[in-house]
């Protein structure tokens, strides 16, 4: 029987390649729980072995239970009748199977019934589930709802809800978007009213409408609402926990291009009882921003899984399909397309896995710092390290989502092209992968917003320290030649950033922001692939393919960014009549 972990050599290699010693040490806190829980690791090797075994379990369920039901799920779709949302049969069965395997509390602490796994392994699990059924990921991948409760709620709320999440008894939803507040969450108008006379202590009331809510039919909703009446920006927003039921009504579900098994809901709140998560005014600025970092990495992993499924389908088809007396995989135009798909998937996986490790370290160091007294001798050092990791995570998470999601859209399009006319038909799964991939560059922040999230950090030099580390490493031939190309790419990046900073024109910078971010991402990924090639010789082909193409892109982008062409914005506006 297939197993999506065992058969994916690059995914297995990624787990071996990553340096997880610090992540494991922080996550396990000196392996203090090894005597309390029989599944808690006793040392680093035991932890890594546990990660492999859990991922192998996810790989088995994904390949042999979820994927065979994916086509029927896509056809059946989520249903809405008499105010109730119903999952497709295959989706409901998959959730039950994942819960029975104790996989619904992936990152939660063991005291609540969780596996206490780091984000990086959770991302790998998300990739495999998404390869099987991208829509299911939007339920399995929303475990960061529980993680947010764990990070910011009081102990009473944790004890009430987290064991239910871990057991798969409840699912959650992140309830942010409104009809008039899409990407601009500072414009959220849904109101939260403090406890009134006669209400139970601590019970707030939520009123408003939310739209485009993934799994909005979930049992536990984290709702962003305006607690400070009279405010108009993000500082007036707080985060609330609302249970499905009283005052909560799903008004409709959307008919979508893809991820048909995942219900996307419009929800009306009418005096819905809620409890405050954390502190007032910090809903957007602290809690949702923390939630979004995890969400970006999760969507990037989802995109990876969809792309992997599409690539493998195209590869199999190309080997079997004959034209003019030969399998089409022997035609240069086809095999170049396939190797390009493989290269970009492996490049994206390297970036997403690396970003996940940085996100883990930022998160775990932040927790550690919070437990220390300011007078503790290690406090200053850990705080500085946390600040550095937070700065790096702040640029790598949007960069990962941008690269992986745009990659998935291209790979799924190319997979249809390899299939020819057959790929356009529902007889083959690639048309479903193409439809499913399209949402990844839109939800949890569009590609354009990821650029906005990353470009400031790139211009500020937040990647310079990491690039300096990369440049200081020894790369023997033939990797040395490729390292030289990456150094020239960095020179181009610095030329671009220096140029737009000196020019200091906001519209010009915004116009070229994506070119600058993509140049930085290409260079960063190039170095990650060189590091992989030092460990695994076969990776030299991936590194060479990627870096040669990236170097050509860098040259063209640099010419455009540093052209100083003042007519560009005006030309665009004239063409659009604005």
Image (cartoon, rainbow, N blue to C red):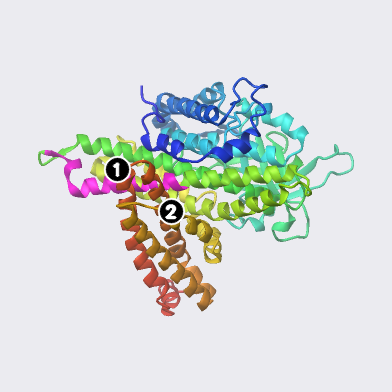
Residue 336 falls inside the magenta stretch: yes
Q: CA distance from mark 2 to mark 1?
A: 46 Å
Q: Can the viewer see residue 215?
A: no
Is residue 109 toward the left or the right of residue 507 in the image? right
Crowd class of label 2 (few under 14; some 14 to 19; many from 20; radius 10 Å): few
Most foreground residue, 535 or 101: 535
Marker count (numbered): 2
Circle 1 SS class: helix
- Expressed as whole percent of the image width and height from the top left, the position of residue 21 reads 55, 38
Q: Which residue is mark 1?
A: 424
In this rendering, the answer to whether 254 lies above or below 380 is above
The magenta-colored residue range is 326-351
Q: Which residue is mark 2?
A: 473
- Expressed as whole percent of the image width and height from the top left, the position of residue 22 reads 58, 40
Residue at the spot 70% in from the left edge and 60% down from the top edge: 233
Instruction: State the predominant SS element of the stretch in magenta.
Output: helix
Q: Quadrant location of residue 164?
A: top right
Image disc number at residue 38: none
Residue 171 falls inside the magenta stretch: no
Crowd class of label 1 (few under 14; some 14 to 19; many from 20; radius 10 Å): some
Residue at the spot 74% in from the left edge and 47% down from the top edge: 377
- Expressed as whole percent of the image width and height from the top left, the position of residue 170 reads 63, 29
Is residue 481 toward the left or the right of residue 183 in the image? left
Circle 2 SS class: loop
């Amino acid at each position: 029987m297939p197993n999506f972990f065992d058969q994916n050599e690059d995914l297995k290699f990624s787990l071996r390649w990553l340096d997880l010693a610090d992540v494991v040490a922080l996550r396990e806190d000196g392996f203090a729980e090894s005597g309390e829980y029989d599944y808690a690791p006793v040392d680093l090797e035991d932890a890594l072995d546990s990660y492999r075994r859990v991922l192998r379990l996810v790989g088995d369920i994904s390949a042999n239970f979820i994927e065979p039901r994916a086509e029927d799920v896509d056809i059946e779709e989520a249903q809405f009748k008499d105010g109730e949302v119903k999952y497709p049969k295959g989706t409901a069965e998959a959730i039950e199977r994942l819960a029975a395997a104790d996989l619904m509390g992936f990152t939660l602490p063991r005291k609540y019934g969780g596996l206490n796994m780091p984000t990086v392994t959770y991302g790998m699990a998300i990739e495999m589930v998404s390869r099987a059924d991208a829509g299911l990921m939007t339920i399995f991948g929303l475990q960061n709802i529980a993680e947010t409760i764990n990070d910011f709620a009081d102990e009473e709320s944790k004890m009430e809800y987290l064991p239910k999440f871990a057991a798969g008894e409840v699912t959650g939803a992140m309830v942010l978007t409104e009809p008039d507040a899409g990407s601009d969450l500072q414009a959220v108008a849904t109101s939260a009213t403090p406890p009134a006379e006669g209400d139970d202590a601590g019970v707030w009331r939520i009123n408003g409408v939310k739209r485009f809510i993934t799994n909005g039919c979930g049992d536990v909703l984290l709702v962003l609402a305006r607690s400070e009446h009279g405010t108009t920006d993000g500082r007036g927003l707080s985060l609330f926990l609302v249970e499905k039921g009283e005052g909560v009504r799903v008004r409709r579900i959307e008919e979508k291009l893809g991820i048909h098994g995942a219900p996307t809901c419009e929800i009306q709140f009418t005096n819905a009882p809620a409890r405050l998560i954390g502190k007032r005014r910090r809903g957007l600025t602290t809690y949702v921003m923390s939630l979004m970092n995890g969400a970006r990495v999760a969507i990037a992993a989802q995109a990876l899984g969809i792309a992997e499924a599409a690539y493998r389908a195209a590869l199999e088809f190309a080997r079997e399909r004959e034209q003019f007396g030969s399998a089409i995989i022997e035609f240069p135009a086809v095999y170049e397309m396939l190797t390009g798909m493989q290269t970009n998937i492996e490049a994206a996986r390297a970036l997403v896995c690396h970003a996940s490790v940085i996100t883990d370290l930022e998160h775990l160091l932040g927790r550690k710092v919070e437990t220390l007294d300011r007078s503790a001798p290690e406090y200053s050092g850990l705080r500085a390290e946390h600040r550095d990791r937070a700065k790096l995570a702040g640029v790598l998470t949007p960069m990962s989502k941008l690269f992986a999601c745009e990659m998935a859209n291209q790979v799924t399009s190319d997979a249809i092209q390899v299939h020819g006319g057959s790929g356009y038909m529902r007889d083959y799964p690639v048309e479903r992968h193409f439809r499913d991939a399209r949402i990844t560059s839109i939800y949890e922040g569009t590609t354009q917003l990821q650029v906005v999230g990353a470009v400031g950090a790139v211009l500020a030099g937040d990647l310079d320290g990491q690039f300096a580390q990369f440049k200081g490493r020894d790369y023997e031939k033939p990797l040395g030649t490729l390292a030289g190309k990456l150094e020239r790419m960095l020179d181009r990046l610095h030329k671009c950033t220096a140029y737009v900073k000196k020019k200091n024109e906001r519209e010009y910078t915004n116009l070229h922001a994506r070119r600058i971010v993509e140049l930085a991402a290409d260079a960063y990924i190039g170095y990650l692939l060189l590091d992989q090639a030092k460990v695994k010789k076969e990776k030299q082909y991936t590194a060479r393919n990627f870096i040669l193409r990236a170097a050509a892109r860098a040259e063209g982008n640099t010419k455009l960014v540093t052209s100083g062409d003042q007519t560009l914005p005006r030309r665009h506006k004239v063409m659009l009549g604005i």
